[in-house]
Amino acid sequence: MIKINNKISTPKYQQIVFSIERAISQGELKKGDQIPSINSIKEAQSLSRDTVLMAFNDLKSRGVIQSVVGKGYYVSSENIRVKQKVFLLFDELNSFKEDLYNAFIKNLNDSIEVDIYFHHFNYRVFNNIIENNIGNYNHYIIMPANLKGTEKTLKRLPNDRVYILDQMPAALKHYSGIYQNFEKDICTNLEKAISYIRKYQKLLLIFSSEKQPLGMREGFIKFCEKHIIPYEVLDSIKDKTIEKGDLYIVPDDKQLLQLIKKMKSMKFFLADDIGIISYNDTLLKEIVEGGITTISTNFTAMGKRLAEMIQNNQHTNIENENRLIIRNSL
């Protein structure tokens, strides 16, 4: 099954890969079949163990074979067209993350396969998902959110296979990735809206320390103190009595809807009585209440650029663009 030609320039590990791919394409090997062991190939072809292991790792990372502890390697997929497998770990799925994902998938070629996972802001889940997939993928795209200790888990992966997405904690800055500069972005965009903000009495940030980027809160406080604007940081709108002259910055969409509901129950008028700035633009925010002002990055651009980095094996750090969209809520 394994054929090695010492007279050609193709690396020997690659010849092992081609031999197993050929056996699968010709029907000699089918899903679930065991393939020859590392030692048997090593001895039969007078190769080093590392050479054979390199070939097996290539096939494993593409999902063609899998290892079973104590038993050996088995064919896990007959789809040998897949040349690269990508591990994609999101914090959660929402409308704008879906835009990112769709743009990423759309701009990849057909030889790249993507598996998506979610950690839901739970470090234990984050750690277990990565631990269970070490060595199974060519690239690992990680959205760490603001989880603590992620650098310990990511140390188990090869540096050149890891890409960080959206939030870039200081401990992960040595990895490649595309990120938002939340502290700078909120400061810059609030500066653009300063003439609107001055019309209100108080600026309030609804901030969940479990989900929202810490830089967002730091940038918010820095802006308010620079311009001597009364401010408050709340973890929820639930128990807050809203007052005329309040301007709310609301990163979470559920909190946004609760705020609008409270505003209506008190017969306050949007913009005149209560101001709102939301995060991450969606079609709904263009329409609801005549339009909600947003601070938003371009998730479609992020997904497209990420696909280019993976396909071209680029290793760099890119700060994704961010903008303020003024609408009826100011």
Image (cartoon, rainbow, N blue to C red):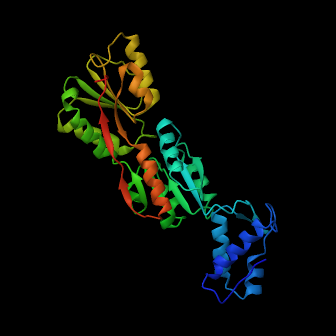
Is the residue 199 above or below the residue 43 in the image? Answer: above
Residue 234 in picture, x, y percent from top left:
37, 30
Residue visible at 33% across and 48% down in the picture: 181
Looking at the picture, how far across and down is residue 174, in whole percent? 40, 63
Q: Is residue 106 left or right of residue 317?
A: right
Q: Nearer the viewer, residue 87 or 224?
A: 87
Q: Position of residue 242 (x, y in %)?
A: 34, 18
State the residue in front, 85 or 142.
85
Which is nearer the eye, 209 or 189?
189
Residue 70 visible in image: no
Q: Relative to 194, is 148 on the left or the right?
A: right
User: Does residue 6 appear in the picture of this structure?
Assistant: yes
Q: Residue furthest top?
A: 267
Point 52% across, 67% down: residue: 158
Residue at the image point whose x is 74% and y is 60% from the top: 78
- Picture quarter with the C terminus: top left
Q: How many marks?
A: 0
Quadrant in the picture for the N terminus: bottom right
Residue 139: x %, y % from top left: 54, 61
Quarter residue 268 falls in: top left
94, above or below 110, in the image:
above
Name which quarter of the figure residue 133 lies in. bottom right
